[in-house]
Amino acid sequence: MFNKQTDFGKATFDTLVGANTELKGDVTSKGIVRIDGRVTGNVTVQGDLFIGETSVIKGDITATNIHVAGNIEGNVFSSGLLKLLSSARAIGDIQVKSFVCEEGSLFDGNCKMLEASSVKPILLGKKKDFKKSSDLSQEEA
């Protein structure tokens, strides 16, 4: 499922959403989370987030480091690294400190790179405000 270049196999997960699981609602965690199933709602993780190949997330994501092999439809905020593996598909705007996009992955949205001094700790329950690219084009007109 994941290649040897990631730490997916070595990580100890506090929470695992299996491939046959579908969650509707927001997910909040202070630990390391791996999602292989479907989530409809926002995902906020103070630790690292691993999104497997079979996953589909429809909602905004906030985490420290995010490794994506599956599908995301929503905005992403990472105070550390966002890595899109070759099977990843991300539709939405992102704000990241570091961004790695492997060949074969798909990213459709706007990217804002954060400076180290502007990265704030992730606060659970606090929603980040992102503007969709379609909203930005209407403001300029």
Image (spheres, grey):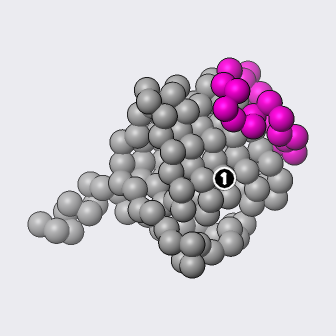
> Magenta segment, principal secondary structure?
loop
Q: Is 137 on the left or on the right of 90, as rendered? A: left
Specify few, some or many for label 1: CA neighbours under 10 Å numbering under 14, 14-19, or 20 or more: many
The image position of residue 126, as x and y in percent, is 64, 70
| Residue closest to the far bottom | 117
Front residue (pair 129, 32): 32
Residue 77: in sight, yes or no?
no
The image position of residue 43, as x and y in percent, is 65, 51
Q: Is residue 37 magenta?
A: no
| Residue closest to the far left | 141
Q: In this view, does 117 lie above or below 101?
A: below
Task: Tell me the residue that label 1 is attached to.
Answer: 65
| Residue closest to the far front | 5
The image position of residue 58, as x and y in percent, is 54, 41
Front residue (pair 69, 10): 10
Q: Residue visible at 57% across and 78% down? A: 117
Q: What stretch is highlighted in magenta?
A: 1-21
Q: Residue visible at 40% across and 56% down? A: 111
Residue 68: in sight, yes or no?
yes
Q: Is 110 on the left or on the right of 53, as rendered? A: left
Q: What element carries label 1?
A: loop
Q: In which quarter of the image is the N terminus?
A: top right
Q: Quadrant of the C terminus?
A: bottom left
Q: Residue visible at 51% across and 28% down? A: 86
Amino acid type, callout 1: Asn
Q: In this view, does 123 lie above or below 103?
A: below
- Residue 103: name its quadrant: top left
Q: Is 118 on the left or on the right of 9, as rendered? A: left
Q: Is residue 88 above or below residue 46?
A: above
